[in-house]
């Protein structure tokens, strides 16, 4: 199910692009608490960050959980950003924002319910394979929770 809420979807006016060098695609998801309000607050947190320029956001996609399925449906969306921050700084920012919005530092178990999950799907054309970080994000091309919002979002650019 596709949902349309304030800031989701969003497309920045092309005349307002800040010429930051790095392109980042984020996938966000949540299924605990007021997920839509969390997404809106996340958007505003990113917008207020002087190192981040939000290019666009997708609609919100509501979908069933996978992996551990005995939990509420998830809300997912994608964001395309430009930034002058490097990869490690973006990773630290994501980690900080997840904690700010109530996600515990350690998951109770794999695919556990969460207040906010932020995945870095892409960072420029970089390929990274570390224990704690994979870019492009592992298996994103097989996840409807990423593909449906992102395909919708990319349709903005036609």
Image (spheres, rainbow, N blue to C red):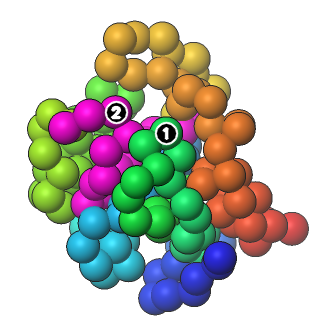
Looking at the image, the residue that sits furthest to the front is 70
Magenta segment range? Answer: 108-122
- On the rendered structure, is 19 left or right of 104? right
Q: Tell me the quarter of the image containing the N terminus.
A: bottom right
Q: Is residue 68 above or below residue 79?
A: above
For the residue pair 11 and 62, the one nearer the viewer reads as 62
Describe the element under mark 1 as helix, strand or loop. loop
Describe the element under mark 2 as helix, strand or loop. loop
Looking at the image, the residue that sits furthest to the top is 130
Give the Cα separation between the discs numbered 1 and 2: 8 Å
For the residue pair 55 and 36, the one nearer the viewer reads as 36
Q: Which residue position holds label 2?
A: 110
Q: Is disc 1 in contact with disc 2, using a CB cutoff of under 8 Å?
A: yes
Q: Which mark is residue 137?
A: none
What residue is rendered at 38% in x and 40% in y? 111
Q: Tell me the quarter of the image containing the C terminus.
A: bottom right
Q: Is residue 1 above or below residue 135?
A: below
Give x and y (percent) for residue 51.
31, 52
- State yes or no: residue 98 in magenta: no
What residue is rendered at 43% in x and 43% in y? 68
From the image, give the main secondary structure of the stretch colored magenta: loop
Q: Is residue 86 above or below residue 149?
A: above
Q: Which residue position holds label 1?
A: 67
- On the rendered structure, is 20 left or right of 30? right
For the residue pair 137 and 51, the one nearer the viewer reads as 137
- State yes or no: residue 116 in magenta: yes
């Amino acid at each position: 199910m596709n949902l349309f809420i304030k800031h989701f979807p969003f497309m920045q006016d092309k005349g307002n692009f800040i010429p930051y060098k790095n392109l980042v695609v984020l996938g966000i998801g949540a299924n605990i608490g007021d997920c839509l309000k969390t997404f809106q607050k996340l958007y505003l947190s990113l917008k207020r960050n002087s190192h981040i320029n939000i290019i666009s956001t997708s609609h919100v996609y509501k979908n069933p959980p996978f992996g551990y399925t005995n939990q509420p449906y998830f809300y997912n969306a994608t964001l395309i950003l430009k930034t002058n921050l490097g990869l490690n700084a973006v990773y630290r920012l994501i980690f900080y924002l997840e904690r700010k919005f109530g996600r515990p530092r350690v998951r109770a178990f794999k695919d556990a319910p969460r207040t906010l999950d932020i995945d870095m799907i892409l960072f420029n054309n970089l390929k990274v394979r570390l224990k704690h970080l994979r870019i492009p994000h592992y298996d994103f091309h097989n996840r409807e929770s990423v593909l449906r919002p992102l395909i919708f979002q990319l349709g903005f650019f036609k």
